[in-house]
Image: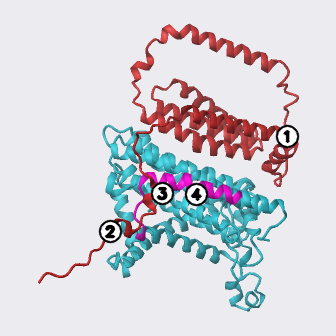
């Protein structure tokens, strides 16, 4: 077994364990932490596959931003653990059915030849000067420029739509106008009065 | 000497490699930890002088041994774990802040070729690591099971996420100008003379980067996560002894890191400001001082580190909503406009930094 294989088995082992603990632990904060470990180990696996850009971006976006917000929300919720376990037996058949459907779908997709071992055999290794970032950039910004830009615009539209859907104006709510507060000068607030001294 | 060389050649190549890497790590970390210790001393002294006080001057000559005394005190203090806290996360949290703060130093080029890991996507690597430091603060605040610590964790989380966007955009401007994510190449792209440094064409991004760097490290005037007057000490109220010291160490290591990065990305890192002035750099002995080298990098880093202390002594703390406004409504639009202008300049083939 080469060193690279050892790393692969190490990371995938940790990944699987963290994935299992993510769905089984009771404490939601522990679940979020296991998910972070999942992201981290999959990023490590990507790096060993010479996709260092994707690996680092996975850490940057999911670990560095998305999961921070997740934790943020989870910590603020006061979750009743007993309540979560209610009706486990009642919903078990539905859950099993969903799991079965997903399993069958995955088997069909993976055995359909689309993920043939031949196709994904280890290609030739690139040298140290190979830049994954550059390769991705060439594909995204030259070969698939228009699809990529269109996808970006669609996402932007989705963001604006989501904001406008949840935006509600409350005319009576009071808030501070920070621009005005910052721009305030001494003359606006204090009036110095010159008075004759008492005799 | 020959005997040692003989032993060295007996060791297998893989083990040799590991030994060399470990020695390099030690050579980076030991000076870093010493720098952190003496930054705390410098901070107390400088702020002292700014406020017309003496600062620490009792331990050792002129107070020089004060940081050592502090370390010894923290080492011997008991690490108190609150009864109702989540003890595992409580103890892991300080390490989670410290590790990214140290690991980020692995890709910093100290001088030409003086770098531990010269990786392609160095800038992204640093951005990813600095964004992970906030976990320690959030988890530490949560695990302490204290209201002040919890409030501070919330504040820190929201603040770091907001300023990371402005910081990332500022870095986008740098990598557009340099045409590379590799930190060494970013420095080499600034070689030529003092006018090739990125600070001149990217002055706005430089300001945004340093301001968001101060906010990212939770330092004054953005230290609402600590906020002594409002929430006592924030996320580390419940910490004591070495657990507290780790948070402290991470904060200062991050400060030095941001200063080092600002000097690398905008002031040419180890490039000398006298570059291109051959009559100076070719002088017999002084030439080495006027030429490129690690001393310029350290000098520039110390310069920005001084700004941190200066800010702390002069600016009052921002109010929380003002911090959010500054980040989202001023810094982010500014960076977007600057990047757009830079894009047009590059598109027209007008590259003033070359």
Query: Do marks 3 and 1 both belong to one polypeptide chain?
Result: yes
| Disc 4 chain ID | B
Q: Is residue B11 magenta?
A: no
Q: Nearer the viewer, mark 2 or mark 4?
A: 2
The label number, if any, that marks residue A190 in the structure image: 2
Distance of label 1 from label 2 (alpha carbons): 62 Å
Q: Residues within 10 Å of mark 3 (few under 14, many from 20)?
A: few
> Secondary structure of the magenta portion, mostly?
helix
Q: Nearer the viewer, mark 3 or mark 2?
A: 2
Distance of label 3 from label 1 (alpha carbons): 43 Å
**Horizontal side, residue A173 vs residue B278: left or right:** left
In the rendered image, which residue does mark 3 sit on? A179
Q: Is residue A18 visible?
A: yes
Q: Which of the two residues, B237 or A75, is positioned nearer the viewer here?
A: A75
Marks 2 & 4, CB-CB < 8 Å contact: no
In the rendered image, which residue does mark 1 sit on? A144
Query: Do marks 2 and 4 both belong to one polypeptide chain?
Result: no
Residue name at image x 62 percent, y 50 percent: B128
């Amino acid at each position: 077994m080469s060193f690279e294989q050892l790393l692969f088995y190490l990371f995938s082992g940790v990944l699987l364990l963290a994935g299992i603990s993510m769905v089984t632990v009771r404490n939601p904060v522990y679940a979020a932490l296991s998910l972070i470990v999942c992201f981290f180990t999959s990023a490590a696996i990507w790096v060993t596959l010479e996709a260092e850009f994707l690996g680092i971006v996975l850490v940057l976006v999911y670990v560095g931003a998305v999961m921070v917000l997740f934790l943020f929300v989870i910590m603020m919720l006061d979750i009743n653990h007993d309540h979560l376990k209610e009706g486990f037996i009642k919903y078990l058949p539905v859950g099993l059915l969903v799991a079965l459907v997903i399993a069958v779908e995955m088997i069909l997709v993976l055995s359909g030849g689309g993920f043939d071992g031949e196709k994904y055999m280890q290609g030739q290794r690139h040298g140290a000067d190979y830049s994954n970032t550059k390769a991705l950039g060439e594909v995204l910004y030259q070969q698939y420029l228009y699809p990529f830009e269109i996808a970006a615009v669609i996402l932007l539209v989705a963001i604006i739509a989501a904001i406008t859907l949840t935006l509600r104006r409350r005319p009576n709510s009071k808030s501070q106008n920070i621009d005005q507060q910052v721009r305030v000068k001494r003359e606006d607030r204090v009036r110095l009065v010159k008075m004759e001294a008492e005799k | 000497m020959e005997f040692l060389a003989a032993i060295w050649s007996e060791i297998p190549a893989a083990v040799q490699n590991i030994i060399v890497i470990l020695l390099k790590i030690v050579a980076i970390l030991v000076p870093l930890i010493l720098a952190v210790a003496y930054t705390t001393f410098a901070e107390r002294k400088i702020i002292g002088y700014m406020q017309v006080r003496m600062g620490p001057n009792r331990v050792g000559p002129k107070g020089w041994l004060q940081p050592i005394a502090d370390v010894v005190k923290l080492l011997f203090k008991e690490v108190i774990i609150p009864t109702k806290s989540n003890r595992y996360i409580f103890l892991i949290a300080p390490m989670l802040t410290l590790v990214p703060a140290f690991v980020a130093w692995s890709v910093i080029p100290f001088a030409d070729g003086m770098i531990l890991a010269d990786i392609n996507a160095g800038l992204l690597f640093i951005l990813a690591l600095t964004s992970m430091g906030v976990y320690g603060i959030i988890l530490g605040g949560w695990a302490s099971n204290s209201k002040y610590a919890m409030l501070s964790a919330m504040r820190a989380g929201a603040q770091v996420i907001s300023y990371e966007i402005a910081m990332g955009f500022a870095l986008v401007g740098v990598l557009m100008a340099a045409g590379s994510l590799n930190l060494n190449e970013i420095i080499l792209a600034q070689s030529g003379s003092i006018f090739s440094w990125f600070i001149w064409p990217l002055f706005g991004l430089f300001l945004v980067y340093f301001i968001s760097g101060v906010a990212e490290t939770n330092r004054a005037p953005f230290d609402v996560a600590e906020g002594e007057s409002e929430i006592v000490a924030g996320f580390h109220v419940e910490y004591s002894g070495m657990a507290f010291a780790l948070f402290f160490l991470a904060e200062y290591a991050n400060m030095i890191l941001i200063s080092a990065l600002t000097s690398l990305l905008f002031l040419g890192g180890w490039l000398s400001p006298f570059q291109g002035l051959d009559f100076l750099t070719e002088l017999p002995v002084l030439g080495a001082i006027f030429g490129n080298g690690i001393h310029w990098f350290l000098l520039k880093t110390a310069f920005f580190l001084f700004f941190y202390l200066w800010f702390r002594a002069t600016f009052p703390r921002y109010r929380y909503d003002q911090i959010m406004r500054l980040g989202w409504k001023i810094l982010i639009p500014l960076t977007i406009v600057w990047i757009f202008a830079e894009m047009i300049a590059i598109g027209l083939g007008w590259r003033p930094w070359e």
